[in-house]
Amino acid sequence: MTTGGRHYSAVPQPYSDEACHSEIPSSFSPAVRSACQSHSLTTQIFGAKVIVLGDSSVGKTSLIRRFVSRTFECSYKATIGVDFEVQKFYFLSKQFDLRIWDTAGNERFKTITSAYYRGSNAIILVYDASKPEDTLQSTRQWLEEANEKQPADGCLLFLVASKKDLLTQTGQVQMQAEGTAMAKELGAEFWAVSSMSGENVADFFTRVAALCFNKAVSAVAQHDSTDAGAGKTAQIVSDGGLIRLQKPSMESQPSQTHTPGRICCRQS
């Protein structure tokens, strides 16, 4: 597990105008900027939980490793159950931790992995751009299974084409057309990345984190504004990556940040 500090004052732009879902913003809302600049919120923001789903060998682990450790290996041992990494961001000078949950794509681990879908703030559906016939179509099923555990209505949703580097220029044009069409069907934002070269990987995860931050602080700012007359302040507290709102009371103790740990190790 690797941590770092990444500072940003703006939301990275989407992969393309056509690939951006209409309901996903492209910048921090005025309310969020105002709250962060005025320091009017006595809010602790611990982070967001993001789950990465997709068939086995589509490149989920490579994608996460490229972002977290900036490394790439030609082969990885298959993930058993779930694993996760944490990355620290500073948006508008406010700390935000992104918890990225890497799930096994093998059918025999679905009973284990599906138990960790609950409490997700964003869902990333990954498919192999060099094998769209199978892996792209199966993203529907992955989303349906995630919806059974937690409705995706409250989650940010992204569709990612991995292994972009394996395609010819003509293949990349076709990939973008197919991926964008599927993303619109699913209600997701589309991205194409290469874990081998690192192309678009950092921008993608930073956009995911920034949009989670924007949504969380917007909710708290609105909640705090509603309760301002009563002298109550909303807080974001973290339950292993789950963001929820809580009204503090005189009797309550300050919330503590849960220290993430490894849920399941990889094969050695």
Image (cartoon, rainbow, N blue to C red):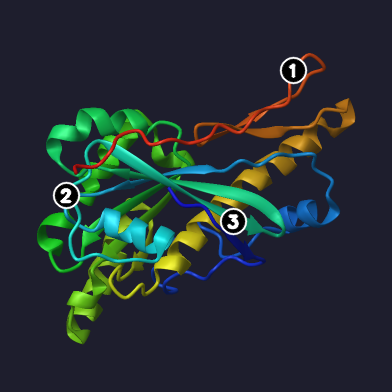
- Local packing at callout 2 (Cα closer than 10 Å; few below 14, some 14-19, many 20+) is some
Q: Quadrant of residue 211?
A: bottom right
Question: Which sits in the foreground, 228 or 185?
Answer: 228
Q: List the residue tagged with mark 2.
A: 56
Provide the residue designation for mark 3: 89
Horizontal relation, residue 44 to residue 100: left or right: right
Residue 251 versus residue 11 in the image, above or below: above
Q: Which mark is residue 252?
A: 1
Percent coordinates x, y for residue 98 in the rendering: 51, 48
For the residues marked 3 and 2, what is the alpha-carbon distance in whole angstroms?
A: 29 Å
User: Crowding near pointer 3: few (<14 within 10 Å), some, many (20+)?
Assistant: many
- Amino acid type of the residue tagged 1 in the rendering: Ser
| Residue positioned most to the top | 251
Q: Can residue 139 be seen here?
A: yes
Under circle 2, the secondary element is: loop
Q: Which residue does the image show at 28% across and 38% down from the upper left?
A: 265
Front residue of 12/23: it is 12
Are dots 1 and 2 in contact, CB under 8 Å? no
- Please count the marks in the image: 3
Residue 182: x %, y % from top left: 27, 59
